[in-house]
Amino acid sequence: MWTFVIRRVGQGLIVVVAAAVVVFLLTRAFTDPVDFVLPLEATEEQREAREAELGFDRPIIVQFGDYVEDLSRGDFGESLWQPGRSTIDIVGQTLPKTLQLVAAGMTLAIALALPMGMIAARRPGGVLDRILVTTSLIGLSMPQFFVGLLLLIVFAVQLQWLPVSGYGGFSHLILPALALALPAVGRLTMVVRSAMIDELNSQYVRVSKAKGTPTRVIFTKHAFRNAGVQVLTLSGWEITRALAGFTVVVEKVFAWPGFGLFALEAIQRRDIFLLSTIVLVAAILVVTVNVIIDILYKVIDPRIELT
Amino acid sequence: MIKMSRLVALFCAFALITTACGDDSSDDAASDVSIVIALGSEPTSLDPHLVDDGGERAVNDNIYETLLSRASNGDLVPSLAAGFPTRLSDTTWQFKLRDGVSFHNGEAFNAASVVASVNRMARLIEEGVSDLEGFFASLSGAEAVDDSTVNISTAEPDGVLPSRMYWLKIIPASAEASSDLSGSVVGTGPYKFVDWTRGESVNLEANTDYWDGGAPSVGDVKYRFISESGSRLAGLLSGDYDVITNLNPGDASSAPQAATALGQEHPILILDADEGITADRNVRLALNLAVDTDTIADSLFSGFASVDQGQILSPSILGYNEAIKAYPYDPERAAQLINDAGVAGETITLVGESSGRWLLDAELLQAVAGYWEDAGLVVDLQLPEFGAYIGVLFDRENRRDAVFVSSSNDILDADRQFSSYYEAGGIGSSNTDAELADLIDAGRREVDDAVRAGLYQKASQIAYDEAYFVWLINNEDIYGLSARMSWQPRADSKLLVKEMSAS
């Protein structure tokens, strides 16, 4: 177990370092933020002065050396877009908001998808199953921005039950969380359903049915436990995906000042320092979630060998 | 992202039919009125001397004031100065200051505040941390004559100085040494800073002791930052917001109210007057005659643009030449000129950009390319990403036949646009006309407004006669207002809440 954890963390570190290097090289090689940041009519001298101030006039390898040295001292650099602010401060301020959104959205998704999938699996082909499958297919095939706008127009513009966008109290969280959850509900429901159908058709379930075990116990204790591994895999994928920036669409539509929205702003404003920090932190998060999911496999199904 | 906002507009048209979209519930006392303004971008800093940033200005223009300001039509008027400056010499201007004005922290506004503002700006420029260098690098110093008189000097004679004083926000003398004023936002204006929660909102409250007429009619102001234009529109329709910026032309009919003003944005095409097929004046003339700017303004920009009258300046700017009229749309004559010049079927390069930095810029160039093709040319339309485009625009060695630029004029003074694109050797200019360059140089040094206007009018006339550019349109700024708001936007695009009222 512990050798496994250490090995996975080691592999994760390689991924994180690789992501940091790639982003550093790509942003330095293909963009010149100075042109973008300065006013259009800035003179050549002003451009050169700003490049020198930011250190872009030095060879890229020297810049990378400095970057690594600064990182080793915990200095993530200053934002180009918000002068005077450390990029790690900006991440520290926006990441909790994304985590809040992802936590709410994923809790909602799992809370909806588990009962829906299990209900659908009880009588495959039945009326309830057909309704749930159709709903899930609609949910998972709708583009996220469309879901977001639809929710926004119905609940904020027309009914005016909830605030339209921005960050604030609990009421501000409901629509973006729902927009994040709905496509995931569709995907998860389908997986829970098919995994449960497989389990319910298996030999051991039939035997225990014949022995007179109550349906409720078969469902929750036997079948679901075995279906859990597949559900966990997909849930982990959903969470990783959300953390890796896929919340950006929802954050943009609802003006939710999270990690994804700031990543987008960093790209649009050519803030390569902020972008580098965001990618680094996102890579660490994704690796962490993956390691946790791997460990949970073992908890759910002790037969799984962690290698 | 245009698609999204279209979608919202569509849904809202539907929503309007089924329910009342706008909220016209009325509030009670005027001073209790609070409004919410949705901006497209958050201020990057609230220090008025550091950044050149629309989000910062939208907020700080209500907190800080300047020696001179502008009437809503763009004319300079005194603000913290008691009157217009007097010229002591070609390089020194004397400002008499208004009495009885104090900062929100109780500190008195006086000559020391102006000296502190000029000095701090100079220091930040010297340290290389201010984006406002282009506006203030010409200032050489300020000196208090007495408590309410200050002399401001420039290194060279500088006709732009009054406009610069419309741009330099005045800080309290005690703030001079600060390196970042974002945490202590103190001005003399009609609104006081309350708080700024990054990523969420900025809150202001009315300054009940405001020197110019006491408390403004709107009490509290909340700014929200909503980058997606469809979401801004949705918030306007739901009644969450009272004012939204940068409404898409196509969405204007969905908003409860759309308010517009002719802005300072002028997309033009810079033609290479020295080499290639555009070296022939008749070809440059044909490129103007071939483009139907009326249709572009009416269709592509849904009527929220006016046709440029053969010059880069808006009517609100000193030096605007009323005698110059747009070249007519005359496709036959254009084709004839192209033919006579012997360049029919030849290729002309037209360079723009593809990041969508300017409203509908790629679509605009595609339309122009179509018109030029109709006149008998083959158009090589290039739309690289922004960085590569900037490289082309400022490439002094190799000027392309036609390069797009959409130049804005923040301080409403002609010099910046003229010296950048009209004057030979300017960073984006494509001509070597010595007479034109002399006029622009003289205009920059001229300190008498009437003489200066005459120089610029002549410069515009020469550029027009020589057809050094293809002038297209002048964009309107479009704002969405909730049903209870009443406000007329300004020529200088400033969002001054003291000019707004809400029922």
Image: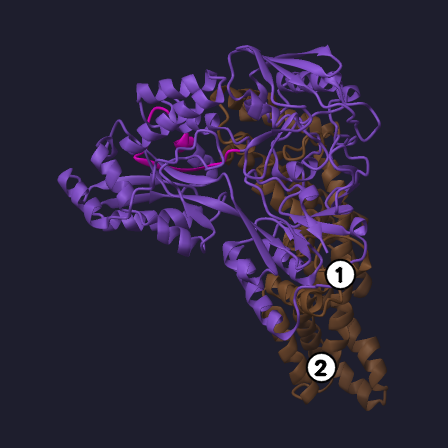
Mark 2 — residue?
A: A121
Look at the image and say whether residue B396 sits in the magenta stretch. Answer: yes
**Residue A69 falls in image quadrant:** top right
Residue type at mark 2: give it: Ala
The region drawn magenta spans: B391-409
Q: Residue A166 placed where, x, y %?
A: 72, 53
Q: Disc 1 is attached to a residue of which chain?
A: B
Q: Are marks 1 and 2 in contact (CB under 8 Å)?
A: no
Q: Residue A58 placed where, x, y %?
A: 55, 21
Name the residue nearer the viewer: B151 or B204. Answer: B151
Q: Disc 2 is attached to a residue of which chain?
A: A
* On-image quarter of the C terminus of chain B: bottom right
Q: Distance between the residues labelled 1 and 2?
A: 54 Å
Q: What color is chain A drawn in?
A: brown
Residue at 57% across / 49% down in the picture? B246
Mark 1 — residue?
A: B26
Residue at 35% across / 35% down in the picture? B323
* On-image quarter of the N terminus of chain B: bottom right
Residue at 41% across / 35% down in the picture? B312
State the purple chain.
B
